[in-house]
């Protein structure tokens, strides 16, 4: 069988934790920030863990990520 390719966009945006969860940066901090509340901008800092449904999709994009 040929090797499976990893989607380049996924390997740039997501990382797996030691327990196998998918970690990503939060959305909503690129533009139009003046209309977003300070609480929303503060909570969107750093990284977050994806929910199980989204993590399953992302893991299919990265077949060799453990």
Image: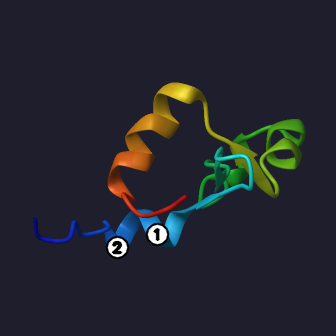
Q: Position of residue 20 (x, y in %)?
A: 64, 47
Residue 14 position by quadrant = bottom right
Q: Quadrant of the C terminus?
A: bottom right
The image position of residue 27, as x and y in percent, is: 61, 49
- Tell me which colouring the rendered structure shows: rainbow
Residue drawn at the location 59% of the way across and 59% of the way down: 31
Residue denoted by label 1: 11
Q: Nearer the viewer, residue 15 or 20?
A: 20
2 sits left or right of 33 in the view = left
Relative placement, left or right, of 59 versus 66 is left
Residue 63 versus residue 31: which sits nearer the camera?
63
Q: Residues within 10 Å of mark 1 (few under 14, many from 20)?
A: some
Q: Secondary structure at mark 1?
A: helix
Marks 2 and 1: in contact by CB < 8 Å?
Answer: yes
Please tell me which residue is depicted at 36% across the width and 57% down the height of the picture: 63
Q: Residue at x 43, y 47 (%)?
A: 58
User: What is the total number of numbered labels drawn onto the structure image?
Assistant: 2
Q: Is residue 29 above or below residue 53?
A: below
User: Residue 43, percent across and down?
Assistant: 85, 42
- Residue hosting label 2: 8
């Amino acid at each position: 069988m040929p090797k499976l390719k990893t989607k380049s966009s996924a390997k740039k945006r997501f990382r797996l934790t030691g327990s196998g969860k998918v970690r990503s940066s939060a959305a909503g901090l690129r533009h139009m920030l003046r209309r977003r509340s300070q609480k929303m901008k503060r909570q969107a800092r750093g990284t977050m863990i994806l929910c199980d449904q989204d993590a399953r999709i992302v893991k299919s994009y990265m077949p060799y990520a453990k």
